[in-house]
Structures are given as structure tokens and as C-alpha cells.
């Protein structure tokens, strides 16, 4: 996509002279529009915004109070949709960490018709000398957790340099989160809706070890991790509830007096009640009930799916597969290593639990592309 077809959207709070210097460089690159959102900066910063507003190809919008980066981005998206015909948007930070060359790299790769989120990714490897240690560790942990739960490794989940085409802006307006958590919610939304996220390597720039950032390490990290882990915690809670139901039903079915009365008219049940196979009957009934409850909870509470054709049968296939894999793997590892089968089962089932979550999210309750 040509730069003339793109808007560079820059949310800003209490900027220094790095912002007008960056905007001047963007003007030279001839973008269609440079849109700056003043997110409630104090009066002493207004001369910077007034100066930018007077430059050709630039526009400034103001929030009366600080509403957060996510709210500022949505303000910009709405303005672009309502007041321009531009085909692409590149979001960038106002602290000088994104070069004009990198914004141009994203613009050139952006396609007007393809739903795709481009992510300008900094180098957080140990070979990079630019990254402050706390930023390197934080990004690595977040990337690993995101990959574990959402199936795609993104080396820079907190990058503010992103690009999307015009058709995606309506969806971006619906994504929740008013502050830094908005950007993580955007990644989660793309994962759930099968929108490709493409990593584009960019230059790694940090000024004064990122001391000028408005990111609050505790408050904003909590918001981000609450989003990443929120669904998994719901999935875990639903599983614990269903485990309790399964256990209680098993005890009741194994000992309920009504079962003996029923057996008077059914000889095969009478035979089961006098043998160890009665445990199998109670287990089977309890498991069917708890699995049915688990399906309902996961569909409505965890993955929030109203209609999902074929989900029941996919869920049944997955349950059977998990039981078989657990039994086979535990037996095989016990035979090979001699380690207690109970200890092996704990590890294997924990791994299968995470895999089970991923498969339910993407396959059992996953929405096909275009839905």
C-alpha cells in the first residue's frame, strides 16, 4: 500500500520534543494523514499540539481528560472512518521509539483487502543491547504465556507499531479496553477470529531505558495478564465445578437406595450391584452428566459461543481422545521409566489440560473464517 493511502495514528500524553520531531519526519514521508490524539495532557503541553495542528497533512484531536491509550486509539479509528477515505492505518507511539523507516515498512506490506494485523516487532533476544532488562523479561514471559494459550508466538506483544486496513477498523472499534490492555485485547480478538497476525522486524529503540513511558508496571501488567489468563481461569473454574459434580454423583449413584429398587426389575443391574463393575456404572453416569455440564459451561461462560454447528460431536471426539491419550501415555511412560503411574498421570493430565483448552478454543468452539 502506498504511504499516501495510509494514516499514521499517534496517541499522546504529556509529550516532549520527540513528538514534533517525529511528526516532521513523517510529513517528509508523505503520508495521507498524521493524526495525533491528545489524551488529556496538561495545559503546558498544548503548545506542542498546537504547533503540530498547524502543519500540513496533520490533525490533532483532544480528550478533555486522560482516558487511556485504548480510548485514544478508538477515537482515532472513528475519525478515520467518518472523515477520510484512507485505506490503511499505522498506529505509532509518541516517544520516538518508532522510526519513519519502520512505519514505511509496515505501509508497504499492508494489503487493502486482506484482513491482517501487522506487528512491528522489536528484538528482545539476549543479543540486543538496547532493551532494558525489565522490558526484556516482561516481554518474554508475556510472549510465552500468549503462545501457550493462544497458539502463536509473538516476540513483541506490547508493540505500539501496528498496521491494519480500513475494513478492520470497525472491528477495532468494538474491541474493549481503555488503557494499555487494549493492545492485548486486539491480539486476543485476532486469535479468536482467525485474523492473521504477521510479525515485521523493526529497529529496537529505547530512550533512557524507557523511563518516559506511561506504562504502570503493576497496574497495567495486572490488566494485561487478567486478559490473557481470564478465559483460562474460567476454563479451569468450569473444570473444577464439573469435577466436583462428577465426584458427588459418583458417590450418590454408588450408594443411593433407589438404585437397589430399580435393580429388582432389571437383572443386569442387580448383577452389577453385586460386583466391582458397579463402580463402572456409577462412573459412566457421573461422567456423562459432568461432561454435559462442562460442555454447557464452556460454550456459554468460557468461550461465549451462541451457535456453533457440530460442537457437540467435536466435544465428544475430544473427550474420548483425551481419555485414550492419557491412558496410553501414562501406561507407556510407567513401563519405560518405572516412575509411579500416579505421578506420571498428574504431569500428563496437566499438559493435556492446557492442550484441551487450546483445542476447545480453536476447534470445538472455534468460529470458521468469515463467520
Image: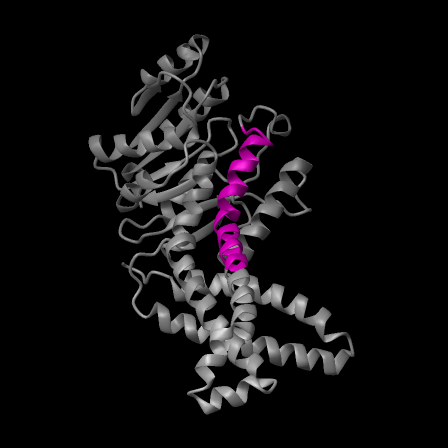
Residue 220: in magenta span: yes
Q: Position of residue 328 (x, y in %)?
A: 61, 81
Is residue 319 visible to us here?
no
Q: Position of residue 160 (x, y in %)?
A: 47, 37
Is residue 86 visible to us here?
yes
The magenta stretch is 215-241
Q: Give the camera-side residue of 165 and 253.
A: 253
The rendered magenta stretch, by its main secondary structure, is classed as: helix
Residue 7 figure quarter: top left
Q: Give the camera-side residue of 153 and 191.
A: 191
Q: Is residue 275 above or below residue 236?
A: below
Q: Position of residue 314 (x, y in %)?
A: 39, 72
Q: Residue at x 56, y 37 (%)?
A: 222
Residue 82 figure quarter: top left
Q: Give the camera-side residue of 34 and 214.
A: 214
Q: Residue at x 41, y 52 (%)?
A: 301
Q: Residue at x 21, y 30 (%)?
A: 83
Amino acid at each position: 500500500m502506498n504511504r499516501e493511502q495510509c494514516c499514521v495514528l499517534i496517541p499522546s500524553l504529556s509529550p516532549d520534543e520527540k513528538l514534533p520531531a517525529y511528526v516532521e519526519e513523517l510529513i517528509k514521508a508523505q503520508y495521507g494523514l498524521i493524526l495525533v490524539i491528545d489524551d488529556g495532557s496538561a495545559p503546558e503541553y498544548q503548545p506542542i499540539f498546537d504547533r503540530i495542528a498547524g502543519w500540513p497533512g496533520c490533525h490533532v484531536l483532544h480528550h478533555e481528560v486522560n482516558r487511556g491509550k485504548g480510548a485514544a486509539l478508538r477515537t482515532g479509528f472513528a475519525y478515520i472512518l467518518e472523515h477520510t477515505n484512507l485505506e490503511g492505518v499505522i498506529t505509532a507511539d509518541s516517544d520516538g521509539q518508532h522510526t519513519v523507516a519502520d512505519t514505511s515498512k509496515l505501509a508497504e506490506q499492508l494489503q487493502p483487502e486482506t484482513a491482517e494485523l501487522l506487528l512491528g516487532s522489536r528484538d528482545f533476544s539476549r543479543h540486543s543491547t538496547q532493551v532494558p532488562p525489565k522490558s526484556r523479561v516482561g516481554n518474554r514471559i508475556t510472549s510465552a504465556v500468549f503462545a501457550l494459550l493462544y497458539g502463536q508466538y509473538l516476540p513483541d506483544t506490547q508493540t505500539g507499531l501496528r498496521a491494519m486496513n480500513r475494513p478492520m477498523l470497525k472491528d477495532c472499534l468494538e474491541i474493549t479496553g481503555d488503557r494499555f490492555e487494549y493492545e492485548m485485547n486486539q491480539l486476543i480478538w485476532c486469535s479468536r477470529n482467525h485474523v492473521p497476525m504477521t510479525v515485521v522486524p523493526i529497529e529496537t529503540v529505547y530512550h533512557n531505558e524507557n523511563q518516559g513511558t506511561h506504562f504502570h508496571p503493576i497496574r497495567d501488567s495486572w490488566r494485561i495478564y487478567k486478559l490473557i489468563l481470564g478465559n483460562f481461569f474460567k476454563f479451569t473454574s468450569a473444570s473444577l465445578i464439573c469435577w466436583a459434580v462428577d465426584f458427588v454423583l459418583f458417590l450418590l449413584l454408588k450408594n443411593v437406595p433407589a438404585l437397589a429398587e430399580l435393580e429388582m426389575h432389571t437383572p443386569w443391574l442387580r448383577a452389577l450391584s453385586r460386583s466391582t463393575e458397579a463402580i463402572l456404572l456409577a462412573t459412566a453416569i457421573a461422567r456423562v452428566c459432568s461432561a454435559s455440564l462442562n460442555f454447557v459451561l464452556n460454550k456459554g461462560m468460557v468461550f461465549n459461543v451462541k451457535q456453533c454447528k457440530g460442537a457437540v460431536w467435536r466435544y465428544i471426539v475430544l473427550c474420548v481422545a483425551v481419555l485414550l491419550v492419557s491412558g496410553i501415555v501414562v501406561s507407556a511412560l510407567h513401563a519405560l521409566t518405572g516412575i509411579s503411574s500416579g505421578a506420571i498421570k498428574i504431569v500428563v493430565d496437566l499438559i493435556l489440560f492446557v492442550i484441551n483448552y487450546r483445542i476447545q478454543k480453536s476447534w470445538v468452539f472455534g468460529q470458521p473464517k468469515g463467520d
